[in-house]
Image (cartoon, rainbow, N blue to C red):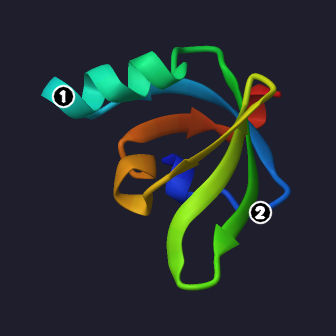
């Protein structure tokens, strides 16, 4: 399951990244690492971006980037 499939208000644990190269590095720099807790706050009115809370920090990422973040909803 990827982060794009999680609905606003739901939380999950990150398990991995399917991104490569610069995108993988960017996501890791933002704090995406296995075991991190992610909560979806809301989607923007025109779909992109999605606002998330990652280990207590609020971020906005594109849905194309969220698709590259593998998560486990049952991990919490």
Q: Eyeballing the image, is 12 above or below 26? A: below
Residue displayed at 44% across by 38% down:
69
Image location of residue 15, percent across then percent down: 52, 23
- The residue carrying pointer 2 sits among few (fewer than 14), some (14 to 19) or many (20 or more) residues within 10 Å by Cα, namely some
Residue displayed at 52% across by 15% down:
33
**On the picture, is 74 further left or further right than 32?**
right
Q: How many numbered callouts?
A: 2
Image location of residue 20, percent across then percent down: 18, 28
SS under mark 2 = loop
Question: Mark on residue 48?
Answer: none
**On the picture, is 18 further left or further right than 53?**
left
Say which quarter of the image contains residue 42.
bottom right
Q: Residue furthest bottom?
A: 46
Query: Do we see residue 36 in this rendering?
Result: yes
Residue displayed at 43% across by 17% down:
29
**On the picture, is 31 further left or further right than 66?**
right
Q: Which residue is mark 1?
A: 22
**On the picture, is 76 further left or further right than 32?**
right
Q: Eyeballing the image, is 16 above or below 65? A: above
Give the camera-side residue of 48 and 13. Answer: 48
Give the camera-side residue of 73 and 26. Answer: 26
Image location of residue 51, percent across then percent down: 66, 54
Image location of residue 31, percent across then percent down: 54, 19
Give the camera-side residue of 26 and 69. Answer: 26
Q: Which residue is mark 2?
A: 8
Q: Eyeballing the image, is 38 above or below 34? A: below
SS under mark 1 = helix
Say which quarter of the image contains residue 38.
top right
**Mark 2 or mark 1, whichever is nearer to me:** 1
Query: Do we see residue 1 in this rendering?
Result: no
Query: Of marks 2 and 1, which one's residue comes earlier in the chain?
Result: 2
């Amino acid at each position: 399951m990827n982060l794009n499939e999680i609905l606003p208000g739901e939380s999950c644990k990150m398990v991995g990244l399917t991104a490569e190269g610069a995108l993988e590095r960017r996501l890791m720099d933002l704090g995406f690492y296995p075991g991190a807790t992610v909560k979806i706050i809301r989607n923007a009115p025109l779909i992109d971006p999605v606002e998330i809370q990652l280990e207590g920090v609020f971020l906005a990422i594109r849905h194309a980037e969220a698709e590259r973040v593998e998560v486990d909803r049952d991990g919490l």
